[in-house]
Image: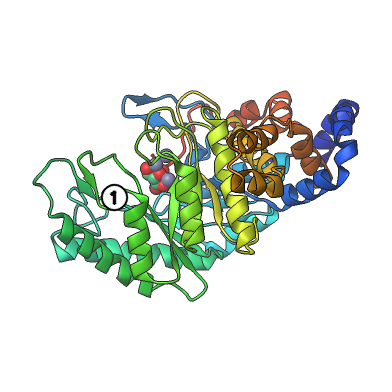
């Protein structure tokens, strides 16, 4: 299904006056507003292929219908999101859920929608039907060298698939760990994982990055072999300059200060990218910004401060990816909301008066430092985000347009009410 530009134009026309009124608030701050709008236009957030279908929990899955049945349809869905918001110009694939049998054709198709391929993800947390050895007791950490080799080979195969599509990074998330005390020799597990990662690292093309994603718990509940940012940082440091830590917001122990972790990793040049989502309890994978929008803002505040200090390009030097999917919302509506929440947090953080903040900090003026941050956080930047979309052909209100065109119904019409996406 393609979204024609007429529909977007009509939608924008009918909302233009109201939009301009809201934007007029920025008339006295044109310089700040313009700089923010330009940065928002450049900022693209990758959509994970596995979030285009309704997510499930271990208690069940309630698919909504019209889900993409193959990689081509997943690309079409991301293309639709990107046409609506002009900020979802990339897709992150998961192998073997999304094997591109004809990479050239897939790349061409993505090109038609203006999409690039972000990091490719390997999967050694499930056994596939054509696989000879089991990952029940881990993959890269396994006691049996043959299992480790199978997992290494799979990761290298994922790199090759990514190369054929123009991807530039591999994300490795491992479910490896142990569920009971005594099960695992921690030191051996670390060393085996490091050696296995080293083999994969050696197969990376020269302009590629490896993202080592950490997670504190689940599916193993006593220990995770890449369990926290410290371990991930250690692996990435030992592996070499192409290896980085990936921060998934839902992968910490409760109440972790994620923004401080981000600041430290960034300062060490070892922050690779993000999996954005939100959570109340654990790896809930809820819509970004739906539970703790202030935390998301504080993370972006550290990102901007640290990236500017290091002269890094906001749009291109880190991997910006969503990793959220769940049970009760239309996945495309959910992703539109996540992208918007990330843009809002980014825009608000761009507004922080950094000179004044540093002055307040140096003078130990705690109340003033808090005022400065909260002043930015409490600013309604929705008109700036909408204006950024408008200027590059997106919709003023993507979600409203998606609904008014009955897009889910159209997808159900095309693909069927029982069409269920491959993936988790
Ligand atoms: C798992 O908890 C991680 O967030 C990974 O990024 C995982 O590969 C992704 O969620 C797809 O299953
Ligand atoms: Zn993740
Ligand atoms: Zn996760
Ligand atoms: Zn998650």
Of 139 and 344, nearer the camera is: 344
**Residue at x 44% of width, y 32% of height:** 55
Q: Position of residue 201 (x, y in %)?
A: 37, 70
Q: Taking 214 as reference, is 386 left or right?
A: right
Is 413 left or right of 253, judged from the image as shown?
right
Q: Residue at x 40, y 39 (%)?
A: 256
Q: Position of residue 166 (x, y in %)?
A: 56, 65
**Residue shown at 50%/44% (left/top)?**
259
* Label 1: how many Cα within 10 Å (few below 14, some 14–19, many 20+): few
In screen coordinates, is 103 left or right of 353?
left
Looking at the picture, the colour scheme in use is rainbow
Q: Which residue is mark 1?
A: 128
Residue 361 image offset from top left, x and y in percent: 60, 45
Please tell me which residue lies in front, 161 or 384. 384
Q: Quadrant of ligand 2?
A: top left
Please determine whether, in this image, residue 83 is positioned above or below residue 109: above
């Amino acid at each position: 299904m393609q979204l024609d530009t007429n529909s977007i134009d009509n939608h924008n026309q009918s909302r233009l006056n109201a939009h301009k009124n809201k934007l007029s608030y920025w008339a006295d701050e044109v310089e700040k507003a313009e700089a923010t709008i330009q940065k928002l236009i450049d900022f693209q957030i990758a959509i994970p292929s596995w979030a285009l279908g309704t997510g499930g929990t271990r208690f069940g899955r309630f698919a909504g219908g019209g889900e993409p049945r193959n990689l081509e349809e997943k690309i079409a869905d991301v293309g639709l999101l990107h046409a609506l918001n002009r900020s979802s110009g990339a897709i992150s694939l998961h192998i073997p859920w999304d094997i591109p049998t004809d990479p050239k054709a897939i790349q061409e198709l993505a090109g038609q929608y203006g999409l690039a391929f972000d990091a490719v993800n390997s999967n050694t947390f499930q056994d596939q039907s054509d696989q000879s050895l089991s990952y029940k007791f881990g993959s890269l950490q396994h006691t049996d060298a043959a299992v480790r080799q199978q997992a290494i080979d799979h990761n290298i195969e994922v790199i090759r698939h990514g190369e054929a599509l123009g991807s530039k990074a591999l994300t490795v998330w491992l479910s490896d760990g142990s569920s009971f005390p005594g099960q695992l020799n921690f030191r051996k597990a670390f060393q085996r994982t490091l050696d296995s990662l080293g083999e994969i690292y050696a197969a990376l093309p020269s302009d590629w990055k490896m993202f080592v994603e950490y997670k504190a718990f689940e599916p193993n509940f006593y220990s995770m072999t890449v369990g926290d940012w410290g371990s991930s940082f250690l692996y990435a440091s030992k592996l070499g300059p192409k290896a980085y830590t990936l921060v998934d917001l839902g992968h910490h122990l409760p109440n972790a200060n994620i923004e401080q972790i981000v600041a430290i990793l960034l300062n060490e040049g070892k922050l690779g990218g993000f999996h954005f989502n939100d959570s109340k309890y654990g790896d809930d994978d809820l819509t970004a910004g739906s539970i703790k929008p202030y935390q998301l803002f504080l993370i972006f505040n550290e990102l901007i401060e640290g990236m500017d200090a290091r002269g890094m390009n906001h749009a291109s030097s880190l991997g910006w990816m969503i990793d959220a999917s769940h049970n009760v919302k239309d996945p495309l509506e959910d992703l539109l909301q996540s992208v918007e929440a990330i843009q809002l947090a980014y825009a608000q953080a761009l507004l922080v008066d950094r000179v004044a903040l540093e002055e307040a900090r140096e003078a130990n003026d705690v109340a003033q430092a808090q005022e400065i941050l909260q002043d930015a956080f409490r600013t309604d930047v929705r008109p700036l985000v909408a204006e950024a979309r408008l200027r590059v052909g997106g919709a003023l209100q993507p979600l409203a347009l998606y609904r008014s065109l009955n897009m889910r119904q159209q997808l159900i019409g095309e693909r069927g009410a029982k069409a269920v996406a491959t993936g988790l």
